[in-house]
Image (cartoon, grey):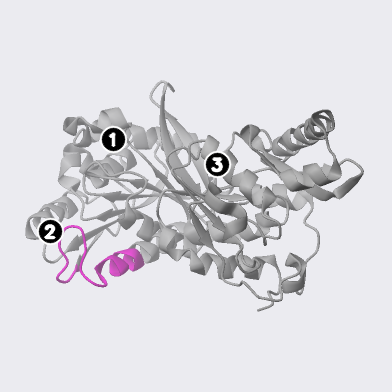
Amino acid sequence: MIFANRVEAGRRLAAELHELRGRDVVVLGLPRGGVPVAAEVASALRAPLDVTVVRKLGVPYRPEVAMGAIAEDGARVLNEDVLRTAGVDEDRLAAVEAAERAELDRRAREYRGGRSPVAVAGRTAVIVDDGIATGATARAACRAARTRGARRIVLAVPVAPPGWEGRVGTDADAFVCPETPPEFMAVGQFYRDFPQTSDAEVVERLRHGSTREVTVPVGDGSTLLPGELTLPEGASGVVLFAHGAGSGRLSPRNRFVADSLNAVGLGTLLFDLLTEEEAEDRANVFDVGLLAARLTDATAWLDTPLPLGYFGASTGAAAALWAAAEPGARIGAVVSRGGRPDLADQRLPEVTAPTLLIVGGGDPQVLELNREAQQAMRAAPGTRLSVVPGATHLFPEPGALSEVAELARDWFLTHLAGAAPAAEAA
């Protein structure tokens, strides 16, 4: 197969990695050609995108010949056969490595623009390049991720020679490559359009990667909560998610809904409302005032002129309604999924944002609580209760969560996408 360009190759590769979607994954592209491929993979997997900067170590008098490679965090791979054949001693190797290490550090700073590297400790690191020939740079990248504490390393490329896994060995835990043609000579022969990727393009791809990891300061700023901010190009609004019952930013149900919103141009912020230590105390899960304060702090931190909405689930729905009722809150719409709005209690009459309450028809107790909440929310224009027939509390039935996502999507498009940004409306 011949790929039209790196973008098409990235989409083809992403299809092979679909089982990782929604998991705790970070995608690391090898600059420069691997970054456009990695950007497509990261977008499809809804995963943060970063680079893993690698430099080839060329033989001093024949720099095109690789005698090894280095990566960030001190990772190094050497080709002992080339070193021996070329007669490169320790001093000359050290000189080449010092020069390449300086260039590596410079590029890492330039590519990230002063941002810290995305954390990989305890996570699955998907390392992506536009293809593999010798495998030296890929091995160095894998070793760097291992040094940084990656739980699992997946090396993924669109094209490679047969038996390419043996060139990497145990430096990766899994290998993904849709095309391994027997006539392989060079990576570029399998692309119709294969221009050199510039540093500027790498920077642009990283800057506009749709999903990035963020740290949200709350309270006095000393408590930091991890999150994921997704901003599609030309986003028409941003929806902040308030998780319930102790779940957090990795909730597969809320991620499913967020994907539906992102697909129609709405940004999303999924973040943990509680630290790991706080979540161990079940009382915190039902402390709606605390959860609402965290959501209010996150809204202030986001500091965007785009229209804002809240999506709350279970106890998070009460927190969303509580926060939406705060004086000065500029929340354009709220959606509650299987929520407990009753826990917002006396704040319900103060909610003015249009609110959609989504409840499963097979969840009678929560359905009754939502009916009572709807009556209490007379100040919220057009508040509506939508019942998903046959669905129980977590909407596990076939098609139930898809209906939730469609209802939420349409609600936010109606009430956010047509709203003017705050800066323009003022």
- Magenta stretch in the rendered image: 388-407
Q: For this view, does 357 lie left or right of residue 354? A: left
Q: Secondary structure at mark 2?
A: helix
The kind of residue on which mark 2 rests is Leu
Q: Residue at x 17, y 49 (%)?
A: 376
Q: Secondary structure at mark 1?
A: helix
Check whether the beta carbons of the residues at disc 3 and disc 1 lie within 8 A of each other: no
Frontmost residue, 82 versus 104? 82
Q: Quadrant of residue 232?
A: bottom right
Q: Residue at x 48, y 59 (%)?
A: 45
Tag on residue 328? none
Q: Quadrant of residue 37?
A: bottom right
Could you say where residue 124 lies in the image, as x and y percent from the top left?
46, 48
Q: Which residue is mark 2?
A: 367
The CA distance from mark 2 to mark 1 is 22 Å
The kind of residue on which mark 1 rests is Leu
Q: Looking at the image, is mark 3 or mark 1 earlier in the sequence?
A: 3
The CA distance from mark 3 to mark 1 is 35 Å
Q: Looking at the image, is mark 2 or mark 1 earlier in the sequence?
A: 1
Q: Is 323 covered by the magenta stretch?
A: no
The label nearer to you, 3 versus 1, is 3
The quarter in which the C terminus is drawn is: top right
Could you say where residue 252 lies in the image, as x and y percent from the top left?
33, 55
